[in-house]
Image (tube, helix red, strand yellow):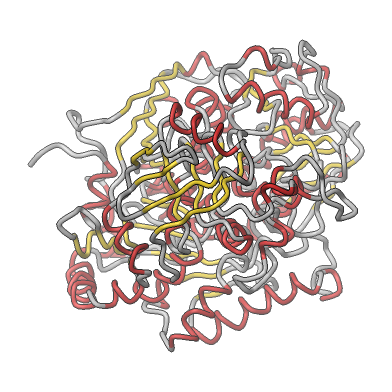
Amino acid sequence: MDKFTTLTGIAAPMPLVNIDTDMIIPKQFLKTIKRSGLGANLFDEMRFDRQGNEVPDFVLNQEAYRSAEILVAGDNFGCGSSREHAPWAIKDFGIRCVISTSFADIFYNNCFKNGILPIALPKEVVDVLMTDAEKGANARMTVDLESQTVTTSDGEVFSFEVDAFKKHCLLEGLDDIGLTMAKADSIKSFEAQAAQARPWV
Amino acid sequence: MSPKTLYDKIWDAHVAHEAEDGTCLLYIDRHLVHEVTSPQAFEGLRMAGRPVHAPDKTIAVPDHNVPTTLDRANAATMTEDSRVQVAALDKNAKDFGIHYYPVSDIRQGIVHIVGPEQGWTLPGMTVVCGDSHTATHGAFGALAHGIGTSEVEHVLATQTLIQKKSKNMKVEITGKLRPGVTAKDITLSVIGKTGTAGGTGYVIEYCGEAIRDLSMEGRMTVCNMAIEGGARAGLIAPDEKTFEYCKGRPHAPKGAQWEAAEAWWKTLYSDDDAHWDEVITIVGEDIAPVVTWGTSPEDVLPITATVPSADDFEGGKVGAAQRSLDYMGLTPGTPLSDIEIDTVFIGSCTNGRIEDLRAAAEVLKGKKIKVKRAMVVPGSGLVRAQAEEEGLADIFKEAGFEWRLAGCSMCLAMNPDQLSEGERCASTSNRNFEGRQGYKGRTHLVSPGMAAAAAITGKLTDVRELM
C-alpha cells in the first residue's frame, strides 16, 4: 500500500451532505475486474452529461480544481454501498485526503486500505476549511498525518483524531494481510478452541 | 460476570487476538462472496500465492450482474463486461474450492437470501460479505456486516478481520403494528428518525414486541437497512422463530450438534442490565405505511403526508433537500398520494422473500396494473419456485407483472433492468440515491404491499385503502 505522510495540495470544496458511493462511482463502472483506471469516472453522473461532455459548474471540472488532491465535503461522506471502487476512483483521480464532519463506516475503513486519509472534524472546523477550499488553486492546504494536523492556506492549524493503529499502517504503508499472517498462531489456536465450543460452525 | 449485550456476547466469542490498543482480529464464521466486489481480492491472493484459508466457510453466488429475463441462459443477454465478471467468479470458485451456486442452479439468488435459505447463516455467527446489505443476516442474531474488497481479500487469506468494537445502540419498537404496516415501514421509520448517519459507529439491536412479532423474513427486512441508518450491523436476538426457520436447512446442524447449537443460541440475548450507549424507542402503533420522497433513505414520510419544502430543513440538509426535490421532480405541498408512478419493482435483498411476494400478491389478487411496467424479481430460485407453487406467480402475471428470474436486478441496476431518464418507480429496494436504479431515474422506497397498491392505482397509494 502507498504510504501517507504529508500532503500539500489544492482542496476542492463539495458542500453537499450525504455524498453516496453511487455518486462517487456509479454502478456501470463496477463491472471491472481491476482496481485501476476508475479516476476517469469519479463522480461520473455529476461530472459529465449523457454525451460525455463536462458539466462546467461541477467543482472538479473547474480549472482551479482539476488537480485537487484534497476533498472537503459535507456530512456523512461515502454512505451507501461497500464498493471499494469508490476510494479506488478517488485515489486514481489524484485525491489522497477527504475531509468531512463524518464518514460512513465501510467507506472510512476502505480509505485506509488504499493510502487515502479520511479526516473527520467538527462542523465549525469543516466550515473554515470549506471556505478556505473555495478560494481556489492558490489556497493550498497541508495535511500532516504524523502531527495529526490540517493547516489552511492562511496558516491556521487544526488537529484531528485518528486511530493509532490505522495511522501507523498508513504512515508505513503496511499490508494488513501480512500483519495478520504474523499472528497465524493465534488464529490457529482460536480455530482449535472454536471447533470444540461450536463444532457446527 | 458483568452484564453484556447480544453484540458483546457474539464479539467476545470471536476475538482471535486482541492488541493492547483494543484492535482485534475477529474470526469470521461465514464469508459470502459475489461477483462484483471479489475479482480483485482473488487476484490479490493469486499474486501473493495465497490459498483461501477456510474454503468450507466461504460461499459464492453471482447476483448483481445477472440478467433476470427468462432467456438468460443465452450468454448474449449479458454485456461483455458483466459476462467477464461472472465468468471470473465461476473460475475463482472452482480454482479456490469454495461453495458455489452458479446462475444455472435453482438455489442461485441474491447472496443475502441464499445464505439464510441454505442454512449457512446461523445465530451467533460472524458473517461478512463485500456488500453493505450483509446486515440482513443480523436477523438471526448473527453479527453481520459489509466489507470492502481489501477486507474480502483479508478474510479470504486469514478468515479474520482487523476490527475495533463498535458502540451498542438499542432500538426498541414497542407494542403492535397497525394493519398495513410492515417491517419495511419499521426500518424506514427508524432511519427517518435517526438519519442516515445516526447509526455511525454503532451496532444496533432491534427489540421490542413489534420486532418479536415479525417473521424471520420481516426481521431480515429490518436488519437489511441497518446500513442505511449508518450502523455497522443490525441484530435481533434469536428465539423460537429463528430456530424453527433454521432447523432442517441444508447446512444447519443436525442431531446432537443441533441440540448443542440450540443450547448456546438460547444464551444469545442482551442481559437486562447491559450497558447501551444509545437507546431509541418508537411506539409501534405510531408507525404508518411510509414512502421516501427524496434521494436519501432518511427522506421518509407517512403516505398521508405532503412533499416537504427545503425550508423545512436545517443546515446542510436545506441544499440537499432542494437538490432532491429538483432531481425527483416534485413540488412542495403535493400530497404524496398524488404522485404518479411509471414503474413498480418488487424484489431485492430487502423485500425479495416469499413473505414479501405473498404480501404484494394479496393486494394484487384479481386486479390489473395501471403503471407502464411492473416486475417481480424473486430473491432466489427457490423463492420463485415456492411462489409458483403457491399460485402467487399467476396472480402477478394476471395483474400484468413480469415474472422474472432471481437476482439483484433493478435494486442497483447493474444488469439490464434499469429506469430511464425521469422514469418514476415505486420500489421495494433499499436505496433511492440519484441514479441508483438508472441514470436520472426516480425512486420511491416502499413496502411490497405499497408497491402493489401503486401498481394498481398508478400513483403512490396508501395500501390501507385497498385492504
**Residue at image location 59% in from the left, 68% down from the top:** B61
Residue B20 or residue B246, whichever sits in front: B20
User: The N terminus of chain A appears in which quarter of the rendering?
Assistant: bottom left
- Total marks drawn? 0
Give the x, y percent position of residue B125.
Answer: 34, 57
Residue B34 or residue A53, whichever sits in front: A53
* Rendering quarter of residue B87: bottom right
**Residue at image location 76% in from the left, 18% down from the top:** B336
- Asked if one can make out residue B248 in the rendered structure from this viewpoint, the answer is no
Classify B104 as above or below B457: below
User: The C terminus of chain A appears in which quarter of the rendering?
Assistant: bottom left
Classify B115 as above or below B210: below
Give the x, y percent position of residue B250.
Answer: 47, 66
**Residue at image location 67% in from the left, 64% down from the top:** A38
Question: For the view shown, which residue lies furthest in the left direction?
Answer: B1
Classify B199 as above or below B436: above
* Rendering quarter of residue B297: top right
- Asked if one can make out residue B288 in the rendered structure from this viewpoint, the answer is yes
Give the x, y percent position of residue B439.
Answer: 81, 47
Instruction: Tell me if B170 is positioned left or right of B369 in this view.
Output: left
* Rendering quarter of residue B16: bottom left
